[in-house]
Image (cartoon, coloured by chain):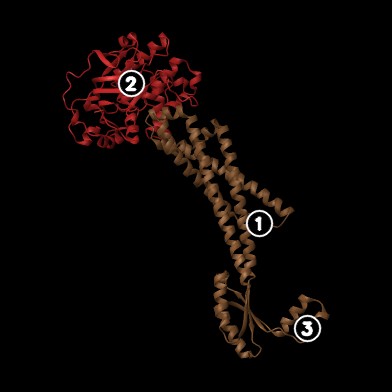
Chain colours: A brown, B red
């Protein structure tokens, strides 16, 4: 049996012998991780929604009536190379769209002659899908002599960006708070476990065990608890996601990479908490 | 000896410990003190030089000086509170002297780092009155943990050492028993097996028969005598006259933290404790020395 196997067996033995303490820690961690996971789920779905909405952001460039076909084609090419895919919408096409949206023939007759300008609709490149970049792009487009006006929903885009930033900030804040909570829970669990096993720790110390020898099983134990808690939290989150998707609104679960990172972060926090706890508690316990 | 027909995969011929310094090796390495390269007198394994230890208002030890040489047996006898356990705790670095100096092997007095302290303890075999076995482990595992602490992890390293130690104390039949399944005498023999499994140069015993009835106490004392006969230095602290009489070697009486009678061994000791290497050198050299010897190796050097 290698030393790693020995440490592993010691960790499992400790988990078995202090089942109550381990169960309490796992439940507390599962609750904390579920909370963090819910915000992660929210952030992921918000990001998906914002990405979906963002993908539909279009800059509409209204052309002056006197612009010739050649000028329009040149502008079309220029905007395409600078800002993204361009679609030409003629006066007639614009009218047809408008008619479809209004739907009332009498109202359309009252309008009389088609007042709508021809336009170029620019589907902006991904790196331009934020308020400052869109404003700058609109300013540059406005400078072309063929352009009558540029619309991109400046206020709406700003709000969308603010919402996106708020969701991200919220997820980070909650993530940090939960991370601190996890470290706190594990720190105290490991401290209590070491104190509960004080006689054993003292005996090992008297036999010449280094702090590392004594500490490694406890660190492994904390990491076990974190893995179990993270998997349980993911299971709870999956249940919540299914319930929401079935009863309320379509949502998606975390991608596998996010779920793996979720478990990985929980294990890393467990390692950190256990190391911190052991560096302090072994000094007070060892003879 | 205890090596019988049912011997485990360990050497059936027990090794002889030798008090001869020239014969003492640790897994074939040169003695630690030679590696340090500094002069060192004689073969003192423990030296107390005017050591006092105060706990609050109480003076547990008061200017105690004594020394023990390699392969010697020294018995400290004294009433409860005489300072015997404090003396052992000073040797194992559980407490520091308030004044004076304690030298154990190449570890000179002063505050050792936690790593150095662990190394020091691995060079000692300690037996307690209350056994201090790990209750959730079998006898085998209790002894094996000492081997693993010394850095040996492979089964082919651990099992022969443990089985040999268990045979030596006559507990090989009880290797799968848990401490609560053993008599007090058997528990103490398990603790002795754990103390000797790494073949330390010094065995410390704190009232080793304190919890035992007479027959078990006689068995344990016979076992300690035999371990000493094989070359290990043996330091026993006890309140009992009978224990002191049953063991060979020097008897030193302690009362109220002072040596009141007996041969402290200081008369013949040269004034050369400064020749000992300092703790940093000691830690370096003891890192090698602390590894347990194989069952057929002679005991660990404590220069």
A126 or B230: nearer the viewer: A126
Letter of the chain that mark 1 sits on in the rendering: A
- Apparent side of residue B22 relative to residue B200 in the rendered image (left or right): left
Residue A141, how many percent across, how many down? Answer: 57, 80
Work out whether residue B249 can be spotted.
no
Q: Secondary structure at mark 1?
A: loop
User: How far apart are labels 2 and 1 at the CA level?
Assistant: 70 Å
Residue located beneath label 3 in the image: A111
In the rendered view, tell whether residue A8 sits above or below residue B253: below
Dot in front, 2 or 1: 2
| Residue farthest right in this picture | A106
Residue located beneath label 2 in the image: B57
Q: Are marks 3 and 2 in contact (CB under 8 Å)?
A: no
Local packing at callout 3 (Cα closer than 10 Å; few below 14, some 14-19, many 20+) is: few
Residue B94, how many percent across, how many down? Answer: 35, 27
User: How far apart are labels 3 and 2 at the CA level?
Assistant: 106 Å
**Residue, x 32% and y 35% (percent of image)?**
B113
Marks 3, 2 in one chain: no
The image shows a total of numbered marks equal to 3
Local packing at callout 1 (Cα closer than 10 Å; few below 14, some 14-19, many 20+) is: some
Q: Are marks 3 and 1 in contact (CB under 8 Å)?
A: no
Residue located beneath label 1 in the image: A252
Place residue B275 in its image quadrant: top left
In the picture, which quadrant includes the N terminus of chain B?
top left
User: How far apart are labels 3 and 1 at the CA level?
Assistant: 46 Å
**Residue, x 51% and y 19% (percent of image)?**
B181
Marks 3, 1 in one chain: yes
Marks 2, 1 in one chain: no
Place residue A249 in its image quadrant: bottom right
């Amino acid at each position: 049996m290698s030393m790693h196997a020995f440490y592993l067996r010691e960790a499992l033995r400790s988990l078995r012998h202090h089942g109550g303490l381990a169960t309490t820690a796992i439940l507390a961690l599962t609750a904390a991780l579920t909370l963090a996971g819910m915000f992660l789920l929210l952030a992921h779905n918000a990001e998906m929604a914002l990405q979906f909405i963002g993908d539909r952001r279009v800059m509409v460039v209204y052309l002056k009536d006197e612009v010739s076909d050649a000028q329009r084609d040149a502008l079309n090419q220029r905007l395409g190379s600078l800002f993204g895919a361009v679609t030409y919408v003629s006066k007639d096409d614009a009218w047809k769209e408008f008619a479809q949206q209004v739907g009332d023939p009498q109202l359309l007759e009252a309008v009389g002659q088609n007042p709508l300008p021809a336009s170029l609709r620019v589907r902006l490149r991904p790196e331009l899908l934020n308020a400052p970049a869109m404003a700058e792009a609109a300013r540059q487009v406005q400078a072309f002599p063929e352009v009558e006006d540029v619309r991109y929903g400046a206020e709406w885009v700003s709000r969308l960006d603010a919402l996106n930033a708020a969701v991200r900030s919220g997820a980070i804040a909650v993530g940090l708070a939960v991370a601190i909570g996890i470290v706190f829970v594990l720190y105290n669990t490991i401290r209590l476990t070491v104190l509960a096993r004080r006689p054993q720790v003292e005996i090992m110390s008297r036999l010449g065990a280094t702090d590392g020898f004594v500490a490694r099983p406890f660190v492994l134990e904390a990491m076990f608890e974190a893995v179990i808690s993270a998997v349980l939290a993911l299971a709870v989150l999956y249940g919540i996601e299914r319930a929401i998707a079935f009863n309320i609104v379509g949502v998606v679960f975390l991608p596998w990479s996010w779920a793996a990172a979720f478990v990985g972060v929980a294990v890393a926090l467990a390692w950190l908490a256990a190391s911190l706890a052991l560096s302090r508690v072994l000094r007070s316990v060892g003879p | 000896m205890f090596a019988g027909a049912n011997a485990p995969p360990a050497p059936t011929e027990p090794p002889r410990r030798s008090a001869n310094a020239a014969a003492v090796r640790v897994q074939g390495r040169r003695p630690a003190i030679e590696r340090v390269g500094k002069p060192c007198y004689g073969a003192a394994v423990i030296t107390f030089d005017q050591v006092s230890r105060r706990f609050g208002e109480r003076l547990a030890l008061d200017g105690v000086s004594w020394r023990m040489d390699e392969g010697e047996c020294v018995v400290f006898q004294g009433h409860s509170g005489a300072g015997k356990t404090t003396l052992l705790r000073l040797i194992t670095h559980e407490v520091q002297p308030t004044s004076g100096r304690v030298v154990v092997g190449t570890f000179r007095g002063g505050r050792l780092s936690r790593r150095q302290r662990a190394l020091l303890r691995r060079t000692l075999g300690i037996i307690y009155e209350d056994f201090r076995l790990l209750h959730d482990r079998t006898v085998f595992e209790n002894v094996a943990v000492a081997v693993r602490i010394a850095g040996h992890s492979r089964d082919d390293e651990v099992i022969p050492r443990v089985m040999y130690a268990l045979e030596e104390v006559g507990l090989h039949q009880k290797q799968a028993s848990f401490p609560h399944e053993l008599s007090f005498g058997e528990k103490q023999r398990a603790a002795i097996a754990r103390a000797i499994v790494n073949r330390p140069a010094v065995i410390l015993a704190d009232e080793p028969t304190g919890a035992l009835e007479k027959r078990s106490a006689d068995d344990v004392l016979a076992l300690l005598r035999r371990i000493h006969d094989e070359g290990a230095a043996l330091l026993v602290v006890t309140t009992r006259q009978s224990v002191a009489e049953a063991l060979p070697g020097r008897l030193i009486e302690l009362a109220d933290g002072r040596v009141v009678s007996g041969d402290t061994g200081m008369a013949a000791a040269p004034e050369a404790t400064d020749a000992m290497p300092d703790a940093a050198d000691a830690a370096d050299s003891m890192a090698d020395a602390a590894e347990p010897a194989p069952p057929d190796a002679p005991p660990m050097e404590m220069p």
